[in-house]
Structures are given as C-alpha cells and as structure tokens.
Image (cartoon, helix red, strand yellow):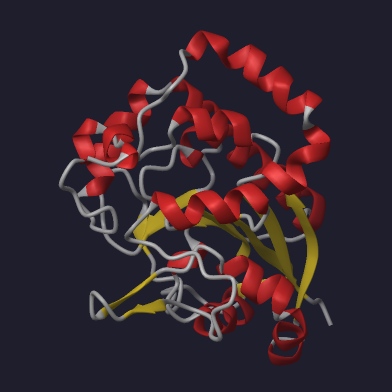
Amino acid sequence: MSLLNLLLEPKLQGIDLQGFDRIALHAEILAQKPLIREVFKEFYDTSISLDRMYFDDVAGYRIELGAGTSLFKKYYSDVISTDVQPAPHLDAVIDAEDMNLSDESVRALFGINCFHHFADPCKFFAELLRVLKPGGGCILIDPYFGVLSRILYKRLFSSEAYDCSARDWGYCADHARKSARPNQALTYLVFFRDRTKFDTLFPQLEIVHSRVLPNYIRYLLSGGLNFRQIVPSFLTPLLRRSEVALSRLAPILGLHHVVVIRKRKS
C-alpha cells in the first residue's frame, strides 16, 4: 500500500473523489477538523476583502460557484451558495458554463477550488461577461504553480491532473483511462502562461489582482478534506506564526493563489 493510501481519510476509501457522493463525507470530515476549517475561513475572508476592495460600488448578487461543502454562507449570510448538483445545504443549482441568471445581475462570483473543474473555461468567461454588472467581477482561489505545489499536486490526486505544459485550456486527456481529468494548473495556463491569449479573447475582462496565499503550512498539515490531519490542532498558533516567519517563501512553498477578474465599466 502506498503512503498516499495510508494518509487517505478512512471515510473516503473506495470513494470517487470526483463523484457527488463525496460531498456528504467531506461535510463530516470538515466538522471534525478545526485546522482546515480555519484555512477555509481565511479563504472566505480573503474573498470578501477583495470583493470590497474592487467591486464595492457595484450592486447585485454575490454568488459562490462550486460550493460543495463550503461554509462560506455560514460566515457571510448574503452569499448565495450554489453547485452544479443539488444538495440540501445549497441555495441553488448553477452551472458555471451556463448560468441560469439574468444579464448584468451579479456583483461578484466566488470560486474556491472549483475553476479547474470547468471543462470549457471560455464558456465560463463568456458567462462572466453576460451576468456581471459593469465593474463587478469574479474571485478565484485555485491551486498555485510554485515549486512545492508542482511537486505535490501531480502526486496527490489520481483523479486530477497537474499539467503546466498542456496545450489547451480545460481537461487533460487520460488515455490510460480513456477519459479526461481536471487540470489543477488551469489558472497558471489561462492567467499567466497564456495571458496574452486571455486578454485578446476577452478584452472586457481585466485581471486586477493576483497573489499567493500564505496558509500553506496549515493546509498541508491539515490534510485538507481528502487526507488525514498529521499534527494535533493545538499546534495551530505555532503553525500560523511559522507561516508569518516564512512569508517570503510563499512564492516557492505556496499551495493556493487568488486571481481577481473584473468586467470593465466602459
């Protein structure tokens, strides 16, 4: 048995990590792991802070896409939690590539660890142009492309790829399985490697902010939602101080980054 299999959360043994059945199990795991809950709370706080910074003069809905087991709404009750499939704790079903929303009705869309699951990002960007109010935008938190993340993400999830050299945006073909897998390097491909292509295809969308997030030590040691936590939770303050002390290494060791896209007003 491999080390990854030993570290896998026991509740997820034999479960398709891309399947909908995982959501209820992830909710159970999240309830038992304060360390990862704290990291997610920081993701939500970061998203709201950036929303206020860049979209504050825009009225409209604030919607979370690909929510899964998200606790976003618990902390920010006006956020509408949605996913592509229904669940009792969600407010609505929304497909990010074909949103059942009125034109120019949305102030902000939030996507935490969901962008790389969009099979056709161009359809998503076209929907952003349609549903966002001028001056509104989208905040994406997704896997980063630093040294550590390139090593880890290639090995952690057999159900997902991490291919920084992929020619196309979207899923990566898996010839062995005769299927396709989400590419966790999608934000790198679209917003960094192919930035000129993005700007040319979608000139009304501007990237106004991007940065590496600093909570990588806690995220890694918490095991996220799929793996066992490997340190006791009482060490959280020490881990937080370690992240501050090592903040200059975030571009190397970071596991997630945030990208803010805004619809131009003109």
Asked if residue 89 is positioned above or below residue 219 in the image, the reply reads below
**Residue 158, picture quadrant:** bottom left
Q: Position of residue 132 (x, y in %)?
A: 63, 72
Asked if residue 99 is positioned above or below residue 70 in the image, the reply reads below
Asked if residue 88 is positioned above or below residue 132 in the image, the reply reads above
Q: Residue at x 50, y 84 (%)?
A: 123
Q: Residue at x 64, y 58 (%)?
A: 145
Observer able to see residue 180: yes
Asked if residue 244 is positioned above or below residue 147 in the image, the reply reads above
Q: Residue at x 70, y 83 (%)?
A: 198
**Residue 85, picture quadrant:** bottom left
Q: Position of residue 101 (x, y in %)?
A: 47, 73
Q: Residue at x 40, y 23 (%)?
A: 33
In this rendering, the count of numbered labels is 0
- Looking at the image, which is closer to me, 7 or 14? 7
Q: Is residue 232 left or right of residue 265?
A: left
- Looking at the image, which is closer to me, 254 or 150? 150
Q: Is residue 190 left or right of residue 263?
A: left
